Amino acid sequence: MKQQSSPDGCLSNLVLDRLLTRELAEDRRQTVRAHLDGCPRCSARLVGFERERDQFDEVAPRLRVRAPARRRSSGLALAAAGSLAVAALVLLFLRPRAGDPDRPGQRVAGPTRAKGGLRLSVYLKQGDQVVMGRSGDAVHPGDAIRFAYTDVTDGYLAILSRDGAGQVSVYYPEGERAAPAARADQEVILPGSIILDEVLGPETLYAVHCAAPVEVVLIAERVQRGDLASLVGCSIDRLILDKRPP
Amino acid sequence: MAGAIDDIEKVYREHGYIVLRRAGQILGDAEEAREALQDVFLSLASRPGQFAGDSSIATFLYRVTTNYCLNRLRNRRRRAQLIDRAVVNGSWTTWAPASVDAQDALQRLPEVLARIAVYYFIDEMTQDEIADLLGCSRRVVGKKLARLQAEFESWT
């Protein structure tokens, strides 16, 4: 095996990028420039990178991100914000009661969720804006949702929902069994998205992570019965969105 | 730059092309690369503290893009239940023509080796640069590269 994948002395992509983003110290920049002066290959690569940078606005989608809202942990705090009064009512309505692990609105699903374990996140695309969703957030038919998870060991993952009419849907995976999910200390955003239908009311999203492969239909049955806690060897996280008319 | 990122949109405008290029190189698909670009920055927007300021922004984006894309390749592989063995024939410095085989290989390699393969073959990093990025010694990187070579040879 070669000791280096590039020709002797040639610069790595990272060095070229750091040169373009002005992150190199002066002495390093000088040595890099000296190399570029005598190396047509690296000079051409740098020109290519510059072109990518200059054309980025034309080829890349515009990023539309709103800073995530602060986690709303207190009904009193919400009530104090007059402009958020309606949202506060929704959140209070959805707030779980102690000792009621399957009640809608509870993010942590009782004894099956290990401390520091599986966490479900959602990204909502509303119009041309993408925001991170929180339990209790208002959504509308036609909004798109992407799912993400974090803090799991190797295992199997499924994501389901129960809508305001009690209908259970499997959002992930497409197959019959929960999909393998690699260990994730950092957030993993799942491919694809779902579009919310016209059924209004609380939409409860469940992420189920199991140590062994599990039939999705079995998970769906437990969701339908409100009996997810009986799934052995599985961690569960959930959040609830409040689907309202547009 | 130190500490968490305050202005994600600014970082996106000034550094996004780095993520887009790397995602395209690793994933081998322009549309998936655009999705990766959005996902990486969405994740950064939701948790700006993940950039701890202990490296440059470009170095940080190299790391998170690599991790994201390798996860995505693994998910792709699992979904497709790929069982065919890849044929990896030596150097990947001409990455594009060999992209299919290379991506298949990245899906099959253990995580650490896959990362090193990306840094070494795609980014043309030296062993010292890889060691800096991974926070280990150059000797460790050398051993991993030897393992990588052995892995390739076992596939042919």
Image (cartoon, rainbow, N blue to C red):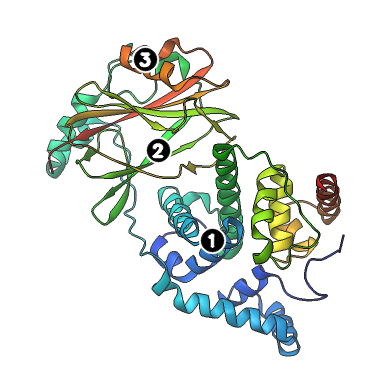
The kind of residue on which mark 1 rests is Ala
Front-most of B12 and B54? B12
x and y percentages locating residue A125 in the rendered image? 29, 49
User: Do dots 1 and 3 share one subunit?
Assistant: no
Query: What chain does badge 1 belong to?
Result: B
Q: Of marks 3 and 2, which one's residue comes earlier in the chain?
A: 2
The dot on residue A73 is none
Question: Which quadrant would the C terminus of chain A be assigned to in this image?
Answer: top left
Q: Which residue is mark 2?
A: A121
Q: Residues within 10 Å of mark 3 (few under 14, many from 20)?
A: few
Q: Which residue is mark 1?
A: B2
The kind of residue on which mark 2 rests is Ser
- At x 50%, y 59%, the residue is B33
Judged by depth in the image, the label closer to the viewer, 1 or 3, is 3
Query: What chain does badge 2 belong to?
Result: A
Instruction: Answer with left or right where residue B66 lies relative to residue B137.
Output: left
Q: As displayed, is residue A100 above or below residue A40?
A: above
x and y percentages locating residue A118 in the rendered image? 49, 29
Q: Which residue is mark 3?
A: A221
Judged by depth in the image, the label closer to the viewer, 2 or 1, is 2
Secondary structure beneath label 1? loop
Front-most of B67 and B87? B87
Query: What chain does badge 3 belong to?
Result: A
Q: Residues within 10 Å of mark 1 (few under 14, many from 20)?
A: few
Front-most of A150 and A25? A150
Judged by depth in the image, the label closer to the viewer, 3 or 2, is 3
- At x 82%, y 53%, the residue is B145
Q: As displayed, is residue A240 above or below residue B116?
A: above
The CA span between labels 3 and 2 is 23 Å
Q: Residues within 10 Å of mark 2 (few under 14, many from 20)?
A: many
x and y percentages locating residue B125 in the rendered image? 73, 65
Question: Which quadrant would the N terminus of chain A be assigned to in this image?
Answer: bottom right
